Amino acid sequence: MSDPTREPTPTDAPVLTPAPETPRHARDVIFGSQQGRIQERLNDLDPDLGRYIQEFAYDTVYDRPGLDLKSKELIACALLVSLGSPPELRTHIRGAMNAGATEAEVRGALMMCVPYLGFPRTVAAFEVLRQHLNR
Amino acid sequence: MSDPTREPTPTDAPVLTPAPETPRHARDVIFGSQQGRIQERLNDLDPDLGRYIQEFAYDTVYDRPGLDLKSKELIACALLVSLGSPPELRTHIRGAMNAGATEAEVRGALMMCVPYLGFPRTVAAFEVLRQHLNR
Amino acid sequence: MSDPTREPTPTDAPVLTPAPETPRHARDVIFGSQQGRIQERLNDLDPDLGRYIQEFAYDTVYDRPGLDLKSKELIACALLVSLGSPPELRTHIRGAMNAGATEAEVRGALMMCVPYLGFPRTVAAFEVLRQHLNR
Amino acid sequence: MSDPTREPTPTDAPVLTPAPETPRHARDVIFGSQQGRIQERLNDLDPDLGRYIQEFAYDTVYDRPGLDLKSKELIACALLVSLGSPPELRTHIRGAMNAGATEAEVRGALMMCVPYLGFPRTVAAFEVLRQHLNR
Amino acid sequence: MSDPTREPTPTDAPVLTPAPETPRHARDVIFGSQQGRIQERLNDLDPDLGRYIQEFAYDTVYDRPGLDLKSKELIACALLVSLGSPPELRTHIRGAMNAGATEAEVRGALMMCVPYLGFPRTVAAFEVLRQHLNR
Amino acid sequence: MSDPTREPTPTDAPVLTPAPETPRHARDVIFGSQQGRIQERLNDLDPDLGRYIQEFAYDTVYDRPGLDLKSKELIACALLVSLGSPPELRTHIRGAMNAGATEAEVRGALMMCVPYLGFPRTVAAFEVLRQHLNR
């Protein structure tokens, strides 16, 4: 993956580019400039919950090697379709694209839900995709 | 539909080998030598159901371009974890590997279920993986 | 509640036809000669649970007028497909047929699960149907 | 698709019986005058998704013989309760009534969800019914 | 049932302590001053549904001895997280607190959903808790 | 509860008894003498998965203060009913009892699933309870 997200608004751009040997966290790519806001919202809900999501879900499970981040995010999208969770689905559609997925690949991931989950969940997912694309 | 499954039993073997430029169906890759047996079992359950799975699920949704087959199968595995469907999960773990996924990638796909679905479903999925690897 | 379950004679044929003014309970039709055994098993699990199922689920919800019993049982089958509950599904496939559903109607009810729930749950349901038909 | 939506006369009886060779699609009955709008919305989400729903879900699964359309729609309503999908539930409550179900039959179908799915999903379904009746 | 809901005085404190032989219903504690409004809404949806919820869910299952009401309500909260039912979750978060649960105990009950159901359902639950606390 | 866990296999017995002020882990109480075997099985499935369950699910979420362990385990039982996961349900029925729950309290926790999840899941749960009690 060459240059995935480049999400550099002036406020949260580091003064110095990190040294190339510094591994980037999956959450940096997935959330981009939204990361601070999202993490703050989770911490407000419950500090432990926010910590579990950052340290366990992202810095442990997501950062685990063995599968590339784009595939992880396409899988996350499909799992969120199974849960019927529109807000998180939108976050991870954006995350999949930030990790390099094309619109066609996201459509392909959502379409895989038809044979496994049926049409209603899949239609709801494509509505979230449309909202994301029309943003 | 002209040349459907290439099951090589005497009765339904085509007279001529298909030309190499004939695109392979996703189901040829996923099921490999099990395809005839699997399709026969589905037809026995209900001929319409068997036909819907072959013609719609596989020859339409799976063969739709836009996402590579390996990614489709890793997504299928995750969705089957969400459904708690061990027999199909085993079929599609094998399918993902037939489509080029490494064991590490399959483990990575199953592990993505932890943050989205929790541990019990994921543990059940890794038990199916172990059965597949120990076959 | 005066005379709820009327344990059947060994042949399951009552010696005398019940008087026409005696309304039959849905559970008499659904369970037929299995009713005593099923209710005993539920009472063994927990007497309150057994009582809730008989008095609330069957004698209240199932015996509620407004929809015919065959339709109720076809709906029950579909809901049990959604829950992935093979033993109860088999009970209510038999119950639907006891209430007058043809095999084609049961197949039609299970097939409706394809567009709403996807293939894996539906395939599992048709396997239960086959077991019932091959009993 | 030749003549899709043909709004029925107030008595819902066509002035002329359709010629016997013109089979009506289930979707003509279910969607009535809304069919064009609904199909357009689905095509906008994704042309393949829209096509799969029309050609596979409706013109194949729904138009399959063996079970009457009213029963299919009552089952669809129950399955949508299991999925917690209010917008589609409303569409198929209307569809069930368009296919001949009385309000009492729709209430009976939703009530069957109590013993199988519990109260929260069923309460949500009756709220959708109330919105439909108060439209 | 003679005097079910006894609307409380504005301060929610009864003028007279109920006689010790009068057992309070679980629903009196859970719903407090909201009980009349909630029951009326359910009866409006469907009189049978309203009756089933009051007489079966509350006066039978909830009033069954063997487990204290606070534990029942914490369990109800967790089950509502599994169902993804925000309005009922809010009702039973309030109910758990009315039955004596502290905020820390409610947070603990919701947090137990992380290992069993994953993060998206749990995050949605903590959002409902925050709305309740900020009311 | 007198002395539940006593994990005395030679290999993982500490040389010195931990000082009494060392807080016990929830997993010591829940799993008792089965802990070594269970953890080994999970590590065999996938070392990362085993580690996540021990370090995150148990030593982080379960050991989090704010709610007593018995309540946590009763909630775990209810959530496992919602997932339809018999093996884990049996483990946590035993865990709830190891944490001090009476049989009546476990029955009360499972019975709470009736109004929220319906009868089929609850019946399956009481079958697991019976197997546990008849062991």
Image (spheres, coloured by chain):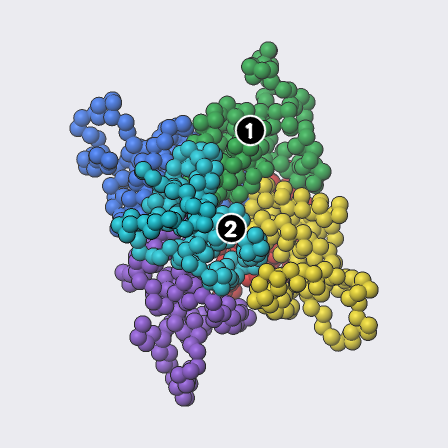
Chain colours: A yellow, B red, C blue, D green, E cyan, F purple
The residue most toward the left is C15
Residue F20: x, y in percent?
39, 83
The residue tagged 2 is: E90
Residue D101, label in figure: none
Type of amino acid under label 1: Asn
Q: Secondary structure at mark 2?
A: helix
Q: Is residue A35 visible?
A: yes
**Host chain of mark 2:** E
Residue plotted at (80% across, 67% down): A13
B10 displayed left or right of F27: right
Residue D14: x, y in percent?
58, 14
Q: Does A24 sit above or below residue A80?
A: below
Q: Does E5 sit above or below residue B69?
A: above
Report crowding for label 1: few under 14, some 14 to 19, many 20 or more residues within 10 A (C-alpha).
few
Q: Does F120 sit above or below residue F24?
A: above
In the rendered image, residues at marks 2 and 1 fall on the same chain: no
The residue most toward the bottom is F15
The residue tagged 1 is: D134
Q: Label 2, label 1: how many angstroms apart (C-alpha)? A: 26 Å
Type of amino acid under label 2: Arg
Q: Nearer the viewer, residue C65 or D59?
A: C65
